[in-house]
Amino acid sequence: MREGVAQYLGKARKCSCGRVHETPLKRVVIEQDALQKVPGILEELDYHRVFLVADQNTWKAAGEALEQELVEAQIACEALVFSEQEPVPDESHLGEILTACPPETEILLAVGTGTINDMCKYVSFRLKLDYMIVATATSMDGFVSVGAALMLNHVKVTKDAHGPVAVIGDTKIMAEAPMELITAGLGDVLGKYTCLLDWKLSQMINGEYYCDYVVDMVRGAVETVVEQGAQIKKRDPEAIRSLMEALVVTGIAMYYVGNSRPASGCEHHLSHFWEMRFLMEGRKPVLHGTKVGVGMIIVTQMYHMLAQETVDFSAAQKKERKVSDWEQKIKTSYLDAAEGILRLEQECGKNNIEQRNQRLQIIEKRWEDIRHTIEEQLPATEQLIALLQSLDAPYCPCQIGLPIEMVQEGIEVGKEVRNRYTLLQLLWDLGLEETYSKQIRTWLEDLEKRG
Ligand SMILES: [Zn+2]
Ligand SMILES: [Zn+2]
């Protein structure tokens, strides 16, 4: 990893997985005083008219200083600074960017993290302009992703967009970000442990496409972060750099593969499920990476439970699944979103019984191999809890106001949000999802008591 992210940029890479991996990302600069390099990068990439977008927080953290750098370098720059601390990525704010963007603009410069990045990603895509992100915090891995998470008509949606041409992360600035943003980024990074394992198991069970090279690059970046875990609390710039690199490498991995498989497994499905319910119930939102971190702990624990499980495969083969029961469960858990979930199942048939039974045959045949893979690839749950705990980051649902019933529902039906094979589908195949949701409840209640 010490070669840094640069090794993944530029040339297309012919891989032993049979695909050619490439990314449109041209520059990644993650270092101290990276801000000062922005004018040079703009020159190199031939952009001369810049439109900078920030909010109150990110303007103070980096926007103001960046504008100064651009003025000194005589690069034409207009800026939009939202009046809010954290603008919602809705129609009104998207419209504000659109109307404030001068017609001669050549590139949008997003200064911020999640929301600002998503909005600039989307508006620049619609305007057929490039954009660059100057990250102010290491809070999530969406910097390089292609989709933009927006709030349209009061509903959270992901719209097609494009990735940035460059990612700039000034470690001095990112190290000063609120600690909860930093640890959220860590949660998103640690989620890669479970998501990569989900991917591996799907390769073993379904013959899904899998790339060792991509897995190694993500895992390597995650391990570098874990090694420096203790330094994150001290806001050590080197640890913050590793964290940002891991977030960017994950983004590049998604480009390499063409979807979010290397970044998102059932820890993310749990997070999406909870987020949706929080939104519907008007609960206070929780940062994406923080939810992913909590989800990752639960998934890790269930994986370790499974590795010790004595599975009754013939009972699993015979287990009946009434469609009407399932539909009822979806309606009570997904509420307003149930229709979309039912439609997805009609399209993809992930719960089709014949296919389940075919999978069960393979799972039974490869059971030892599967158990071994789980033990080999996943750290102990306690180790991951200790890491989050040492940074005062949430690891237990109770710490983020997540009701235990919602955790249980997530384990039982969270897999329905996407057509992607993960531990949650594997538990369903084995007929274990309800047993595990009860056992996890007890386990979490003990964890909560322990404090
Ligand atoms: Zn490959
Ligand atoms: Zn994520």
Image (cartoon, rainbow, N blue to C red):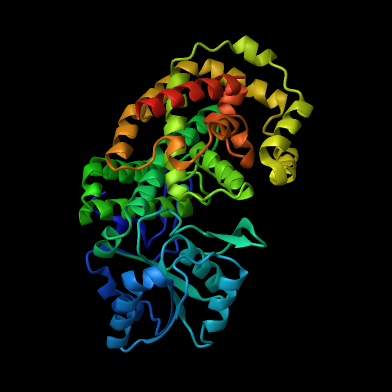
Q: Is residue 196 visible?
A: no
Residue 218 versus residue 192: which sits nearer the camera?
Answer: 192
Residue 300 versus residue 178: which sits nearer the camera?
Answer: 178
Residue 119 versus residue 144: which sits nearer the camera?
Answer: 119
- Vertically, is 274 above or below 58? above
Q: How many marks?
A: 0
Specify the quadrant of the image occupied by residue 173: bottom left
**x 24%, y 51%: residue:** 239
- Vertically, is 262 above or below 409? below
Residue 446 percent coordinates (x, y): 41, 23
Residue 266 shown left or right of residue 343 in the figure: left
Residue 142 percent coordinates (x, y): 46, 56
Residue 94 shown left or right of residue 450 in the figure: right
Specify the quadrant of the image occupied by residue 240: bottom left
- Vertically, is 57 above or below 46? above
Residue 433 shown left or right of residue 381 in the figure: right
Which quadrant of the figure contains the C terminus? top left
Q: Farthest residue in the right direction? A: 324
Residue 360 versus residue 340: which sits nearer the camera?
Answer: 340
- Vertically, is 126 above or below 389? below
Q: Is residue 412 visible?
A: yes
**x 33%, y 43%: residue:** 222
Residue 347 percent coordinates (x, y): 73, 41
Specify the quadrant of the image occupied by residue 215: top left
Residue 209 percent coordinates (x, y): 52, 39
